[in-house]
Image: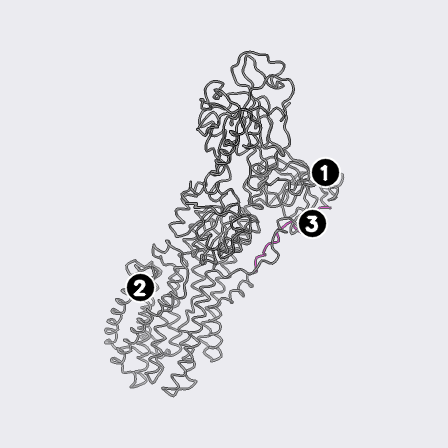
Amino acid sequence: MVWAPDRPAARGGATGRNGVTGRNGATGREGATGTTALEILRALESGPRGLVEADADERLARHGENVFPGRRPDPWPRRFARSLRDPFTAVLLSLGLVSAALAAWGTACVIAVLVTVSCVLRATGEHRADRSAAALRELVAATATVRRRPAEADEPVTRELPVEQLVPGDVVLLAPGDLVPADLRLLRSAGLTVHEAALTGESVPVVKGAAGDLCLQGSSIVSGSATGVVVATGADTTLSGALPQKPGPRLPGPFDRSVNGIAWTLVRFMLCTAPLVLFASALLRGRGLETLPFAVAVAVGLTPEMLPVVVTTALARGAALLARGGEVIVRRLPALHDLGAVDVLCVDKTGTLTQDRPVFDCAVDPEGRDDPAVLHWAAVAALWTLHLAELPAPDALDEALLDADEERGSGADGVEGIAALPCGPGRRIASALVRVPGGDGGSLPGNVRTLRGGRDSAGTYVLVVKGAAEDVLERCTHVAASAGGDAGGDAAGGVIGGRRPLGPGERTKLAARADALAGSGLRVLAVARADRPASTRPYTPGDEQGLTLVGFVGLRDALAPTAAEALTVLAGHGVAVKVLTGDHPGTAARACRELGLDPGEPLTAARIDAADDAELARLAARTTVFARCAPEHKARVVRALRTAGRTTGFLGDGVNDLAALHAADVGVCPRDGVPVAREAADVVLASKDLTALGRAIVTGRRSTGHIAAYLRITLSSNLGNVIAMLTAGLLLPFLPMLPAQVLVQNLFFDAAQLSLAFDRPAATVHERPTVLRPRALFRFMTAFGLLNAAADLATFGVLALTVHPAGSTGGQAAFHAGWFTENLLTQALVMLLLRAGRDAAERRAPLPVRLATTGLAVAGLLLPLSPLAPPLGMTPLPPLYYGLTALVLTLYGAALATARRRYGPQ
């Protein structure tokens, strides 16, 4: 018979199948109470045959559906109402109310239309994003295998049931690949290992063996099978209870800070401009409240009234492009801008930089020299432990050993397995008794499957042991004197040429060598062997003594195939990647080095705990790897980076990542993350792949570039017009432009600027984070606004020479027409020359921009000649005006292009 104890408490945790020492000492027995399966079922008024359907329906009505109590999507009307709180929208609403109070109904109606369009676009975009995120959620398993009975006397029926309909007392069957649909207590299990990384951050699967062990909702089955009974659903699960009931208010992100800064600066400008116009008109021209509509029109002229529409259009278009391929779902439109502003991205190691599986790295003898025989004996133990212990699925470490041995052609299957002693609770080693071909006689009594050691004409019987270094070393009495033999030589795997006694000093040195390998980021297994005599009794763990140490095997995490490329791309975009992990510092540092990312000196959780906020901000700025991190450490690091002025993104997928997701400027979660993490995230990825996130960052920067280009164009043009209006209002005995003309001009200009969402930003926009910076924007606005004002004032001189506006009413109408035409022509010129990038003048504008600017120029030239001119207070202009205006525009364009190349933003 084969001795096979209970499964280990935690593969890679406190104990594992291969005995690898883990990172957090988890036992895998959370909530185990020692209660029998029968007692658990009685407490829930259930039984091993499952609930009766009628009873299940009654419990469903009492407990409610098994749905996660996350954020319910807001209805569309609420989203629309929330959009009204946008600062620019609030400014426009205020101007609209003032216009309505002054009976300027045309201006009020246009503002109302702009506000409505902006809010509809924003609410619709976010509503679609939520629907897309919901569609991604549907791709995750949504059913569970349940045992129920149609009636009390009927036999139980096993069927698939939507997880929403699970109730306490349901008997659920689990198999590899299943998601645990609710909190379960195990009734029985066979080789069950559970992945709980989403809950604990621990990347190594945990073994669940005893009846009463708790399997939490949100974990997944790696191997084995089990039957469990549901003990909690919905809001009563451990996953739901781990959520903060009232998370603190989220700090404003880059988008909110930028928009608020720009909005309040413009509000101050407008609050000063309108009274200034009224005061100057009354003081210099003796006008009274009849100039109030003109003053309001000037304030409207200064406001980028299309900004809410342009911002929403640019962000919604970027979000739609990302969602089209199903790779990225932007759940909150401003998050796309913030994603483009990210200059630090915090990620976990497992699943992002590395895959969730190990690969072979090295095999060394006790002296630290490479020795293929060590790998061969480790593979022998792995192969026959898997076969003879009847494990339900291959262990990841064992698979890595077998793959490496097969690649080297050593042939672990060149021996015959006799018995196996796998790992178990409190046992961090595994052993296999094998028969090696060859030998010098002896007898083989009875059936070979009942033989427990010895030597006969068919070969030698060898006990091979592998596992945690300290556990193997304490069972060793000798060490191989020479372990450099050929794995394919004598005894089909490299015979130990000799051995020597293992003294205390050398034992300490060997333990230090194993620690050094672990410190370099490897998972370390010690390998030992011993010849054993024939025996008719079963082998027991007590026979694993008097071993000879063969050497050590090191395994490392397999790198994610796209990680190195993604890190290079992110670095090229000016994004620093920081690794926040619960792993050993050496493990994380090694993965970083292999990917070309300099890990520097890792910062551990103990050092984070010892630092105050100011010191942590300084440490976080220069640290790449943060190891042994618990959830609170991740959140503190993210907050410290934000305090230092960095725009921080965080990629997380588990309950343990919630605090950091909430603390980051942009929270990112893959679609297979736990529901609460997806709900907390601003951006949802189709997979945990940095490559897709890099593309999303580029899209965010393009969208921000479109918004910044609109603001530069609009604010500089509007400021120039306001300066010209104020100057003309003080010098002329009539209003330089009627309110209706201001309104029509703004409508043409605003409609044309919607084409900027289709512009192609300069190539350099991808190279560094982009953010709307109010100070830089207003410096640009002032410099180029003065240039625009100079062109307007030169046009006033042209009009004074060509139409003599002060002489008659017809002259005033001609002045209005001349300035109207020049304004639209200069605005078309500004759109072409002040697009994103200093090389905008050299780059060919895309077709939508060319069509928009052409339409703007044609409207400026033809409207004074059309039948609409008299109702708008305009008349045709003399030919001389067009010639002189062409000269002014040529000089203005040359000055604009020169200033843009020298002083404009990239």
Q: Is residue 71 magenta?
A: yes
Q: Secondary structure at mark 3?
A: helix
Residue occupied by mark 3: 60
Residue occupied by mark 2: 903
User: Along the line of sight, which residue is nearer the eye, 583 or 352?
Assistant: 583
Direction right: furthest residue: 153
Which kind of residue does numbered mark 3 sit on? Leu
Instruction: Name above or below for residue 75 compared with residue 169.
Output: below
N-term mark: 3 or 2: 3
Residue 723, horizontal then vertical, whole percent: 35, 76
Residue occupied by mark 1: 36
Q: Which mark is residue 722?
A: none
Measured Cα–Cα span from mark 3 to mark 1: 26 Å
Instruction: Name above or below for residue 681 compared with residue 517.
Output: below
Instruction: Name above or below for residue 296 compared with residue 402.
Output: below
Q: Quadrant of residue 26?
A: top right
The magenta segment is 54-74
Give the number of the mark in front: 3 or 1. Answer: 1
Instruction: Name above or below for residue 755 compared with residue 280.
Output: above
Q: Is residue 780 magenta?
A: no
Give the number of the mark in front: 3 or 2. Answer: 2
Residue 756, horizontal then vertical, whole percent: 37, 61
User: Along the line of sight, which residue is nearer the eye, 864 or 311?
Assistant: 311
For mark 3, does the 10 Å Cα neighbourhood hold few (<14), some (14 to 19), or many (20 or more) residues?
some
